[in-house]
Amino acid sequence: MAARIVLAVRESQYIEPLLHYLHHSEYGEMLRITAFSRLDAFIDFMRGEDMPDAVVGDVTFIEAWLVEGRTKVPWAVLSEEGAYLSRSSKSLAGGIMIAKYQALPSLLGAFIQLCEVKRTRGSSVLDETLLLGIVSSSGNTGKTTVAMNMAKQLGELGLSVFYLNLESVDSSGLFLRPPAGNTPGLERLLYEIKASRDKSGADTIDLGQYVIRYDHLRSAAFRPIINVKEMLQMTTQDTLDLLALLVAERNFDVVIIDTGSIEEERAKAVLHKCGILLWVVRNDEVSIHKTMRWLSHCNAPNSGMPSQVMDKSRFAVNFAAEGLEVWAPPVGITVEGVLPYIPSWTLQHREELFLNSPQFQKEILQLCKQIIEPSLPQVFTGKGLHE
């Protein structure tokens, strides 16, 4: 069901191209926008009984509406200063700020996210956010490609998805371009987490001001950390606190965590905290050998690893060339998915292809169904999570 948005701005010339783009794009199925450029018409509409899912407008419109005292729906102020999904000023407490002038796909994506930020979860089949860790025992297994494609597929199914990259060097930046704006990045959030831990005030952190949305990934995320040192200093406790904060926010159905090397502190926290661990392996002897050794280590006494790692683990073979025999796993281990090698990914300007390969996406969707369906049965039966 499309989200219903009321848009109220001074300039009618701002409204016309936005609605034209909406009606001729895929967003036409996701959003219904009722627009006003006159304050009196906007206030009269908002006094009615037919409440929208969210209200977005210039500050003068929003302030006049707030005076009416009927603010039961999420709302946002359109900012000309470039702020993006951050909390508004104290005089407008309770709202969100969205950059007024940005690419139309990003703007409409922010409208959709606004509806999700305050939505209730009474119709959700989940008791809490599902944490899905994507891990690998060695490099060059295509872990990030798998994580991003899973995020996109789950987002297209109607889930609220958060993509969290915890690599020391965030390789997703090769394929994703952050939206315009001055939203603070993950390094700022980590600083706030450390500071709040010292003050025992983690519940005061406003996570929304750090969230951005990658429209073509159909997911929310943080702006990536540029300084590698910041990531290298991120401890196991920092990671656990960050994951706990994402769960406590209750705005996301699934958080997909893209990890770095398995021995890093961040990855150890993922092994401890996530409800599902997807091991991405290549169909070669080295990758399989390292995976089995790490699993053996996790199950060993005094390893410092959670004892239930094997119970939470699922396995997918990536970059499987057609015609090659797929790895026959040891007893007790089931391969949930075999993902194909895509030759076009070796071409120049391949960035656009990584999230748009029909063959790969078909197998990713099947993989999602295999490992996530027990937690999200209604999504894959076609009933929808938020109907």
Image: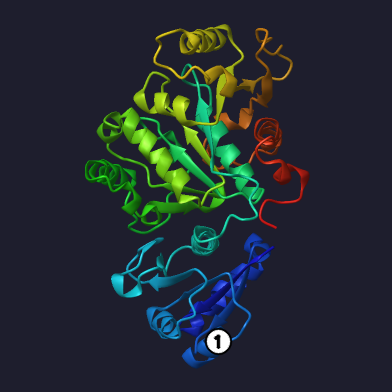
Instruction: Name the residue that disc number 1 marks.
Output: 47
- Quadrant for the N terminus in the image: bottom right
Q: Say above or below: 57 vs 379.
A: below
Q: Amino acid at mark 1?
A: Arg
Image spot of residue 55 (x, y percent): 51, 74
| Visible residue check, residue 227 | yes
Residue furthest to the front: 200
Structure colour scheme: rainbow
Left or right for 302, reference 190: right
Callout count = 1
Image spot of residue 191 (x, y percent): 25, 43
- Quadrant for the C terminus in the image: bottom right
Q: Say above or below: 284 vs 159.
A: above
The residue nearer to you, when weighing 96 against 283, is 96
> At 41% across and 23% down in the image, what residue appears?
268
Image spot of residue 161 (x, y percent): 55, 46
> At 26% across and 30% down in the image, what residue appears?
233
Q: Secondary structure at mark 1?
A: loop
Q: Residues within 10 Å of mark 1 (few under 14, many from 20)?
A: few
Q: Tell me where residue 373 sits by quadrant.
A: top right
Q: Say above or below: 186 vs 296.
A: below
Left or right for 180, reference 357: left
Image spot of residue 330 (x, y percent): 65, 7
> At 69% across and 39% down in the image, what residue appears?
358
The residue nearer to you, when weighing 206 against 307, is 307
| Visible residue check, residue 347 | no
